[in-house]
Every structure is written in structure tokens, then in C-alpha cells.
């Protein structure tokens, strides 16, 4: 039998999608049930675990019982917990018996390492994806695009930044592409429109005629076409040499760098923090080149990787 629910903290209003929980509280815990410790002896955490288990069973049995997903959303309760210095996202999700995708999307966490700077964390009592009405990151753009046809329930949450509308899809989890973006091994294409003229791997160099490994992708586009940062990072090198021509190197965290070569113009500066999708240069034909194109490389721990395995364009605008 399900344990008694905490005092009602959710008021319902009518929106286009039907009954919608409006969670009226600030992220510092005012109005939310508070979990002090991730310990079953903590009353708040004990109740939270019971709520998650109950919701999980309802979601698992939706097809058999004929219950509507909207009912899951109507029963949703959001708890608040302040992470400790020893907490990490994956561990925390496991202890809360909820998917990390649920925590990431509800709290709009950009990447795994941002938990320590996120402040109080909202814990939903039901697993699922929370897709914001107005996306602000690559992951949220991707979710908005790829999940556009999946039915969901609109939830309005009062946060410190104001009211935020989410589309809640009960029981949903990250697919491989979404997980890749969150774990920061995913990159957006550096051009909006292009023609792939050379892939990663062994090829005969079109200028020298020598067979050797091609460490990136060649993306043909007209001279002057905008080149975008494939992910947020710091510009660590700008230069010009006989092979790459005018080029830019951006470091993404500790392990990855991206290189943009044969540029006609560089629109960034050394040591600048650039956002994903920001304009950093223009396509050209400088260096060892047979025509206007972008030579794009990804290197992990100094080793060239096939960009085709990590680049995604769907859902990125």
C-alpha cells in the first residue's frame, strides 16, 4: 500500500494539454518538500523513494491498466535537495532510483560537471523527460526537435528565473544521441550547408598525390560561408600555416579539441570562451587547398577521431 503523500503542493490549472501541475515555489525549497539527506531515515527521502516506486509501477503498467499518462503528471511531486560536495550526478540518480535524464532535463543541467554549481536540485517523483518550451542548449534543442511528435503534458514550474513551461513525457529516457550530447562527446556540424568532399581515413592527397591518412572531414561551401563552433570551449590557438592555411583550434574540456582549417577569415580571438554554434570564422581556400571548403578535425587526448561518429545535425538550429 502506498504511504501517505505529503501535504498537497501542486495546484492544477487547465492548459491546452489538459490538467497541468503548476509547481509554485522557488528552487531554494520554499513550497517544495525538502530532502535533507539521501538516507532512508530522512522522512523526506523515505517518502520520495516511495513516490518514485509508485510512479514507476504505474508507468510500467500503463498499457495493461489503460491509465492515461496525464494521470502520472497530475500526481507528480517535486522535491528539493541540496547536493553535497561528495555527490555526483550518476551516483545521486542511482540513490534516488530515478534516471539521470529526469534530473538533467528538469534542472536544465548542461553537462555532468555542472552539478557542483547547480545549487538546490529538483527531484521529480516520476521518471521521464522534461523538455522546456524555450530551449537554450544543444541538448534542449535536440530534445525539442526529435521529441516533437511525442505526446506530453505541459507543466509550469516557478523557478528563480521565472515561470518555465516543460513538456513532461512520463517514463521517457535519453536515446543514444541525446545521451551523447549530454555526456559531451557530441558535436554540432560547423557548417549549416555543405557538401562532403572527403571523409576521414586513407586517401590520395588531391594536391600532392600521396596516399596518406586524412585526419578530418572536408566540407565544401562557398567562400565566406559562416563557420560555427562545434561545441562550447576556449580558443587555444589561432594561426596560419602552409597546410591548414588560416586555422582555429578550440579546446572542449580536458580531452577534446576541434580544428577549423582553410579559413578566409577568423572571427574570434585567442583565449576567448565561445558558445556552441557561435560564428568563429569564414570558409576559404587558404593553405593546401584545391577550392573553398572547411577542413574540420576532432582530436581526443591528442589523437584524431572520425568526426562522422560524433557530429549531429538533427535538431540543431
Image (cartoon, rainbow, N blue to C red):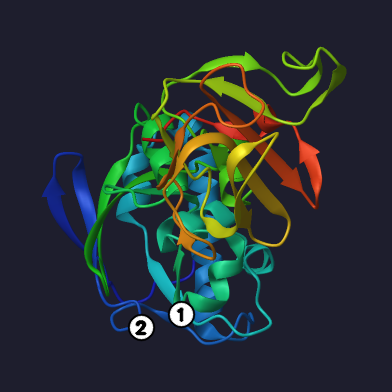
> In terms of depth relative to the viewer, which is nearer, 299 or 183?
299
Q: Position of residue 150 (x, y in %)?
A: 38, 30
- The answer to which of marks 1 and 2 sits earlier in the sequence is 2
Which residue is at a point 37% across and 40% down the rendered structure image? 69
**Disc 1 to disc 2, how far (Cα)?**
8 Å
Which residue is at a point 76% across and 31% down the rendered structure image? 215
Instruction: Please tell me whether mark 1 sits on a helix, a strand or a loop.
Output: loop
> In terms of depth relative to the viewer, which is nearer, 24 or 116?
116
Q: Position of residue 13 (x, y in %)?
A: 13, 55
Instruction: Please tell me whether mark 2 sits on a helix, a strand or a loop.
Output: loop
Residue 283 position (above or below residue 171) = above
Q: Quadrant of residue 241?
A: top right
Which residue is at a point 52% across and 87% down the rendered structure image? 36
> In terms of depth relative to the viewer, which is nearer, 65 or 151?
151
Report how many numbered discs are placed on residues in the image.
2
Residue 1 in view: no
Residue 295 position (above or below residue 194) = below
Q: Which mark is residue 28?
A: 2
Report if the CB atoms under discs 1 and 2 are less than 8 Å apart. Answer: yes
Residue 270 position (above or below residue 67) = below
Q: Is residue 307 left or right of residue 68?
A: right
Number of residues whose C-alpha sits closer than 10 Å to that of mark 2, classed few (under 14), some (14–19) or many (20 or more): some
> In terms of depth relative to the viewer, which is nearer, 285 or 176?
285
Residue 260 in view: yes
* Front of the two marks 1 and 2: 1
Q: Is residue 289 left or right of residue 147?
A: right
Q: Position of residue 66 (x, y in %)?
A: 40, 31
Q: Quadrant of the C terminus?
A: top left
Please give the residue where the numbered disc 1 appears in the rendered image.
119
Amino acid at each position: 500500500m502506498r504511504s501517505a503523500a505529503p501535504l498537497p503542493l501542486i495546484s492544477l490549472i487547465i492548459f491546452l494539454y489538459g490538467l497541468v501541475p503548476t509547481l509554485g515555489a522557488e528552487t531554494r525549497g520554499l513550497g517544495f518538500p525538502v530532502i535533507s539527506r539521501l538516507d532512508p531515515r530522512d522522512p523526506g527521502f523515505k517518502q520520495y523513494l516511495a513516490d518514485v516506486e509508485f510512479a514507476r509501477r504505474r508507468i510500467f503498467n500503463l498499457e495493461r491498466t489503460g491509465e492515461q499518462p496525464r494521470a502520472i503528471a497530475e500526481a507528480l511531486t517535486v522535491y528539493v535537495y541540496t547536493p553535497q560536495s561528495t555527490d555526483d550526478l550518476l551516483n545521486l540518480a542511482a540513490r534516488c532510483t530515478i534516471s539521470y535524464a529526469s534530473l538533467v532535463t528538469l534542472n536544465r543541467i548542461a553537462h555532468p560537471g555542472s552539478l557542483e554549481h547547480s545549487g538546490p536540485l529538483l527531484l521529480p517523483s516520476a521518471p521521464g523527460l522534461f523538455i522546456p518550451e524555450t530551449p537554450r542548449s544543444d541538448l534542449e534543442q535536440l530534445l525539442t526537435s526529435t521529441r516533437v511528435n511525442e505526446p506530453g503534458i505541459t507543466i509550469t514550474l516557478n523557478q528563480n528565473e521565472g515561470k518555465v513551461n516543460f513538456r513532461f513525457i512520463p517514463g521517457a529516457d535519453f536515446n543514444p544521441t541525446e545521451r551523447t550530447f549530454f555526456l559531451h562527446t557530441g558535436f554540432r556540424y560547423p557548417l549549416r550547408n555543405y557538401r562532403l568532399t572527403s571523409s576521414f581515413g586513407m586517401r590520395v592527397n588531391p594536391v600532392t598525390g600521396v596516399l596518406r591518412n586524412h585526419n578530418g572531414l572536408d566540407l565544401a561551401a562557398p567562400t565566406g560561408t559562416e563557420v560555427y563552433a562545434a561545441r562550447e570551449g576556449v580558443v587555444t590557438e589561432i594561426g596560419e600555416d602552409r597546410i591548414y592555411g588560416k586555422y582555429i583550434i578550440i579546446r572542449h574540456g580536458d580531452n577534446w579539441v576541434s580544428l577549423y582549417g582553410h579559413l578566409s577569415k577568423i572571427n574570434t580571438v585567442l583565449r576567448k570562451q565561445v558558445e556552441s554554434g557561435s560564428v568563429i570564422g569564414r570558409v576559404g581556400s587558404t593553405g593546401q587547398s584545391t577550392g573553398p571548403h572547411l577542413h574540420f578535425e576532432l582530436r581526443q587526448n591528442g589523437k584524431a577521431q572520425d568526426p562522422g561518429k560524433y557530429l549531429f545535425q538533427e535538431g540543431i538550429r
